[in-house]
Image (cartoon, rainbow, N blue to C red):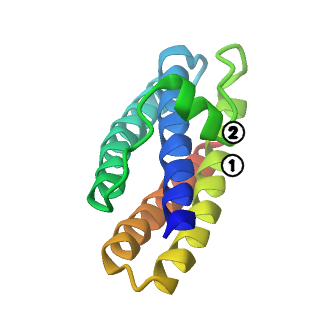
């Protein structure tokens, strides 16, 4: 079960990192697609904020403490910080790639949860996979 918790901690950290990066790009996006991307990024970072809470709660349900400081999350995350100076297309492309990173990590986490017959975690992770696949699809469709 230790490996499962460690994987959930990374998923939590990466979800939080993607939340922050998406919000960063929401604030700083410019160009012809400003309005549509500003709105898309807002929708996505709000969904990621809810996901952060759900993942942290799952870790707590499993009897562990969730990483809850920037220091702890920064040590766990694999997603790179956003650069608010890049153009809109690069922002969209980076976010799409980051959702792909999370899909890969979540699929690994599902396999660990299946090994432990942990249906609650499997359900949460499956929901997150579908959400990240949809977000990635929406972002890829938005590349100008």
On screen, residue 87 versus residue 40, left or right, reads right
Residue 36 vs 86, above or below: the answer is below
Residue 110 % position (x, y): 51, 74
Q: Residues within 10 Å of mark 1 (few under 14, many from 20)?
A: some
Where disc 1 sits, the SS reads helix
Q: Nearer the viewer, residue 110 or 20?
A: 110
Residue 48 vs 7, above or below: the answer is above
Indicate the quadrant where residue 106 lies. bottom right
Q: Nearer the viewer, residue 18 or 27?
A: 18
Where disc 2 sits, the SS reads helix
- Can you tell which mark lies on residue 14? none
On screen, residue 103 versus residue 87, left or right, reads left
Disc 2: which residue = 94
Residue 79 % position (x, y): 66, 40
Report the residue at 64% width, 64% height from top.
104
Q: Nearer the viewer, residue 69 or 138?
A: 69
Report the residue at 61% width, 70% height from top.
108
Report the residue at 51% width, 24% height from top.
70
Image quarter hosting the C terminus? top right
Residue 125 % position (x, y): 43, 67
- Label pair 1/2, CB-CB below 8 angstroms: yes
Q: Nearer the viewer, residue 80 or 84?
A: 80
Disc 1: which residue = 97
Q: Is residue 109 visible?
A: yes
Q: Is residue 33 visible?
A: no
Question: Cα distance, mark 1 to mark 2?
Answer: 5 Å
Report the residue at 47% width, 35% height from top.
19
């Amino acid at each position: 079960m230790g490996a499962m918790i460690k994987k959930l901690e990374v998923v939590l950290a990466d979800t939080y990192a993607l939340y922050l990066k998406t919000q960063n790009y929401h604030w700083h996006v410019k160009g012809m697609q400003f309005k549509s991307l500003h709105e898309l990024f807002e929708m996505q970072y709000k969904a990621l904020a809810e996901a952060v809470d759900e993942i942290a709660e799952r870790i707590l349900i499993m009897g562990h403490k969730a990483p809850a400081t920037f220091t702890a999350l920064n040590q766990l995350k694999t997603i790179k910080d956003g650069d608010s100076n890049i153009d809109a297309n690069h922002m969209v492309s980076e976010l799409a790639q980051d959702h792909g990173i999370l899909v890969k990590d979540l699929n690994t986490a599902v396999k660990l949860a299946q090994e432990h017959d942990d249906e609650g975690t499997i359900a949460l992770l499956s929901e997150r996979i579908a959400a990240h696949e949809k977000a990635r699809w929406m972002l890829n469709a938005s590349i100008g």
